Amino acid sequence: MSAAERTEKATPKRRAEARKKGQVARSADLNGAIVLLAGLAAVSIGGGHVVGQVETAMRNTIALIPTPGVVAEEGIGKLMIDTGQAWVLAVAPIALACMIAGVVANVAQVGLKPATQALKPSAKRINPINGFKRLFGKHIVFEAGKSIAKVAVVGAIAAAAVVPALDELAALVGMPAAQIVAHLMDVLFGVAWRAAAAYLVLGLIDAAYQRWRTERDMRMTKEEVKREAKDQDKPPEVKSAIRRRQREAARARMMAAVPEADVVVTNPTHYAVALSYDGSRPAPVVVAKGQDLVALAIRRIAAEHDVPIVPDPPLARSLHANVEVGQEIPEELYQAVAQVLAFVYRVAGRKVV
């Protein structure tokens, strides 16, 4: 179905289903910008506390140098624990501010309702082919432009802040270290605040784009809207019975195709996938698949009709997870399936189509 036919806005039901799957508009850049601003604010407010905690820890450690016997008596572990506690107390307020900002930014974008279905493990998420498709998909132009814009903006801001101050920075030579550090921190914080503000603007643009893209992807055809409206008018018992009959009919059609399959690839007990290849299509087609009891039925029908059954657990799991019934196998599985079919044809004395 072409994207041009999807002219209708998503219905509440479609939106609810998409939310359950975790398909919501969310900008990671906006979250990052808010967390960065919160971190800078926390450092600006509590920077003295951080410096004081670190200074105290370093002074206490250095003070023990003339008395190594104390360290030997109490143990190096206690010294490391005390130093670690000082660092944790110094960094904790900043980390807490960043964590709260991250949570608030996420809740503001997607709400409080978690998408539990998105947390379920799925083989498609760890499939490297799907990962490459996401990396080099149709949105690569926008993502690449956004990355270039971030680098260019941060670089321009840093150059605009540092280049005019080069003479002033050169004049710091010979000044006390404390004054040099204080001046450099002022320059760095100025650059950081400007970069964070620019990053926030880019994050807002990205959030608007993500919302537009999500709305576009959820659009429906007029036929889908009509079908959904009809389904909503039916009682739950009727809709349940219709779905049950549809599943039974689909399973019956699937099982009827098993005798015509060229091979059944198994796990060997948990999964079974029946493949057919007659040369009229570019690649073999999955005509039936299932697990547990359905897999048992597929193997039984295949055995009754002398369809070869080949155990290949990795291939069976991959086919079951990534290919739907009636679809051709993906290109990355061509070689594995070709080896199985070649073996079957060789044993049966057939020629490869």
Image (tube, helix red, strand yellow):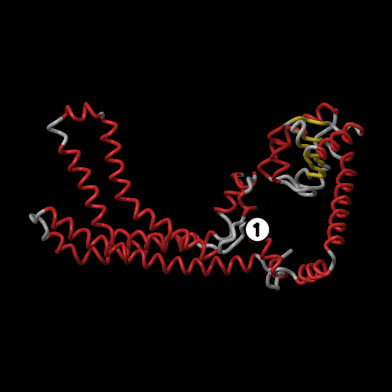
Farthest-out residue, right: 304
Percent x, y for residue 9? 68, 72
* Mark count: 1
| In front of the other: 116 or 140 | 116
In the image, what residue type sits under mark 1? Lys
Q: Quadrant of the N terminus?
A: bottom right
Q: Position of residue 94 (x, y in %)?
A: 34, 55
What is the x, y in percent for residue 65?
15, 33
Kindly give the residue lying farthest to the left in the view shown.
174
- At a point 84% along the width and 57% down the height, the residue shown is 240
Q: Is residue 59 above or below residue 184?
A: above
* Residue drawn at point x = 73 percent, y = 46 percent: 323
The residue that mark 1 highlights is: 20
Side of 249 where 179 appears, left or right: left
Q: Nearer the viewer, residue 285 or 242?
A: 242
204 with respect to 338 (left or right):
left
Quadrant of res 304: top right
**Quarter of the image containing the C terminus?**
top right
Between 264 and 84, the one lying in front of the other is: 84
Local crowd size for mark 1, using a 10 Å CA cut-off: few (<14), some (14–19), many (≥20): some
Q: Residue at x 25, y 35 (%)?
A: 79
- Label 1: element kind: helix
Which residue is rendered at x = 75% and y = 32% of the image? Answer: 340
State the image coordinates of residue 143 (x, y, percent, origin top left): 50, 60
State left or right for residue 284 relative to residue 213: right
Of 278 and 36, the residue lying toward us:
36
Quadrant of res 148? bottom left
